Amino acid sequence: MLIDTHTHLDDARYDDDREAMIARAREAGVDAFITIGCDLSTSQAAVALADRHPFVYASIGVHPHEVKHIGDGWYGEFRRLAKNKKVVAYGEIGLDYHYNHSSPQEQRERFREQVQLARELRLPVIIHTREAQEDTMMILREEGASEIGGVFHCFSGDAWLAKDALELGFYLSFSGILTFQNATMLREIAKTVPLDRILIETDCPYLTPAPHRGKRNEPAYVTHVATTLAELKNLTLRELAVHTTRNTTQLFKLPA
C-alpha cells in the first residue's frame, strides 16, 4: 500500500482522463491520495474530489504564488471547508523567493496568517519553500507550528534544513526529484532521514520521475519514488511502504 501525499488531481491536464488516471494509480498499488489546494477555487475543487472518492483526501490553503489574490471571506470559507472530515491538512503554504509572483513581504504576512489559521483548525501544515529556507523556519518557529506539525513537501533543501525541520517535529516528503540524475546530494540527505519521518509524493502533474521524465506526471508514478527511496534505505519496497503509510496515517490522522 502506497499513499501519494501530494497531488493536484483537479489540474486541467487531467480533464480528459481523470478517472482513468486514478484507476491506473490504484492498479499500481497506490491506495490513497491527498489532493492539494493552492487557492480558494482549487481548495474547493480538492474537497469536491475527496467527497467523490473514499480514498481521496484534501488539503486547503493558499500557495505563496497566489497569496496576493487572497480576498475578503477566503479564510472564512477555509474554516467552512475544514469542517469536512475529508480535509486533513492546511496547505500548501510557505514562501517562494524564486519567482516572487507575490511580494516577499506579502508572502511572509500571509504565511503567518495561514499558520495561525491552521493552528486554529488543528490541521497539520504542508510547507512549500524555495530559496526562502531561513525565513520559512523562522516563521514556523515563531508561530508555534510545532504544535500542529506538518511536512516539507517535495523536499529538495540542504542538509541543515532537513535537520531543522526534523528538530521542529516535521516530516520530509520526497518526490520524483529523488530519481533525477543530478540529485546526488538529495539522495545522500534521504539516506539520513529517520524512517519514521519520511513521506512520498508525486506533486503531479509536475516533477515526473525517471524513467518518465518529459511526460505528464500522475500518481501511479509514485512507485518510482518509493522504489528509489527503498533502495537508498536498503529496504524492500514493501518495507518502505509500511513505514511511509504509517507515517502518512499518523500525520494526517487518516483511517487505518
Image: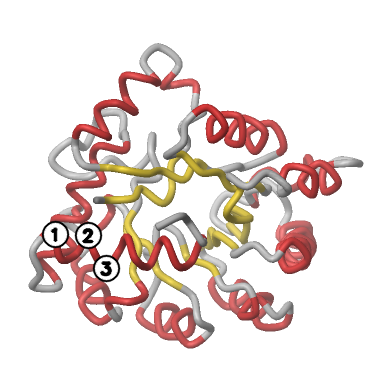
Kind of residue at disc 3: His
Name the residue located 52 percent from the left edge and 65 percent from the top edge.
131
Name the residue located 38 percent from the left edge and 20 percent from the top edge.
19
Residue linked to disc 2: 241
Name the residue located 47 percent from the left edge and 56 percent from the top edge.
254
Q: Position of residue 214 (x, y in %)?
A: 24, 32
Q: Position of residue 154 (x, y in %)?
A: 40, 57
For mark 1, does the 10 Å Cα neighbourhood hold few (<14), some (14 to 19), or many (20 or more) residues? few
C-alpha separation, residue under disc 1 versus residue under disc 2: 5 Å
Q: Position of residue 179 (x, y in %)?
A: 19, 54
Name which of mark 3 and mark 1 comes first in the sequence.
1
Tags 3 and 1 touching, CB below 8 Å: no
Residue situated in front as seen by the camera: 25 or 105: 25
Tags 2 and 3 touching, CB below 8 Å: yes
Q: Position of residue 174 (x, y in %)?
A: 32, 60
Say which element carries label 1: helix
C-alpha separation, residue under disc 2 versus residue under disc 3: 5 Å
Kind of residue at disc 2: Ala
Residue linked to disc 3: 243
Say which element carries label 3: helix
Tags 1 and 2 touching, CB below 8 Å: yes
Relative to residue 15, is residue 99 drawn left or right?
A: right
Above/below status of 79 relative to 221: below
For mark 2, does the 10 Å Cα neighbourhood hold few (<14), some (14 to 19), or many (20 or more) residues? many
Kind of residue at disc 1: Arg
Dividing the image into 4 quarters, which one contains the C terminus?
A: bottom left
**Residue 238 numbered tag:** 1
Name the residue located 29 percent from the left edge and 81 percent from the top edge.
194
